[in-house]
Image (tube, rainbow, N blue to C red):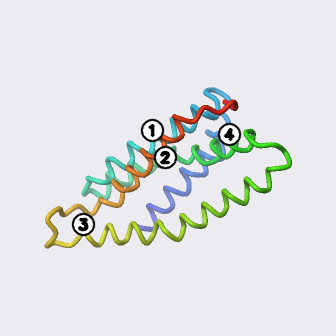
Amino acid sequence: MIGISLAIYGISMALVQGGLLRYMVRWVGERSTVIWGLGFDFVAFGILAFITSGNLALALIPIAALGAVVQPALQGLMSRAVADNQQGELQGVMTAAHALSMVISPLMMTATFAVFSDRDTAYYLPGAPFLLALVLMVIGTAVFLRSRSSVT
């Protein structure tokens, strides 16, 4: 089942980033693509936090994969917001932030899962890491929406 879910996710991501992304950016622009992608993530994470059916989780994978438009569209916006001689710095900062998130995220999510999946906990909710991710995305979205870049 894990192999099937990873295959579905990989195929869905390839279709989204290899095909849908360029059309979506053309149709609605990069800023709106980011917002739409975050919306898909909100829906997927909100549902994944509470479902108990593996089949329903598999069915949600294509919706979750639609959130893959966020990172490339956001990167495009940021790239156009800085001067040509600052592109390397921008890429370095983005790579460092991504690397830091790859260290911190598993620690936060596994600790959250451990706390909320213990049968003796007051609030048994094994999907709590998805809610934590959702809360962090809401905060990031609020920051994004408040930003008024000249690049749209």
Number of marks in the rendered image: 4
Report the front residue among 134 and 151: 151
Q: Taking 99 as reference, is 21 above or below it?
A: above
Q: CA distance from mark 1 to mark 4?
A: 18 Å
Residue occupied by mark 1: 39
Closer to the camera: disc 1 or disc 4? Answer: 4
Judge from the rendering whether residue 20 lies leftward or rightward of residue 79; answer left or right.
left
Residue occupied by mark 2: 140
Residue occupied by mark 4: 77
Q: Earlier in the sequence, mark 1 or mark 4?
A: 1
Q: Earlier in the sequence, mark 3 or mark 4?
A: 4
Residue 112 in the image: x percent, y percent? 32, 67
Question: For the point 35% across and 61% down, which residue is it?
Answer: 129
Question: For the point 38% across and 54% down, which residue is it?
Answer: 58
Residue occupied by mark 3: 116
Q: CA distance from mark 3 to mark 4?
A: 37 Å
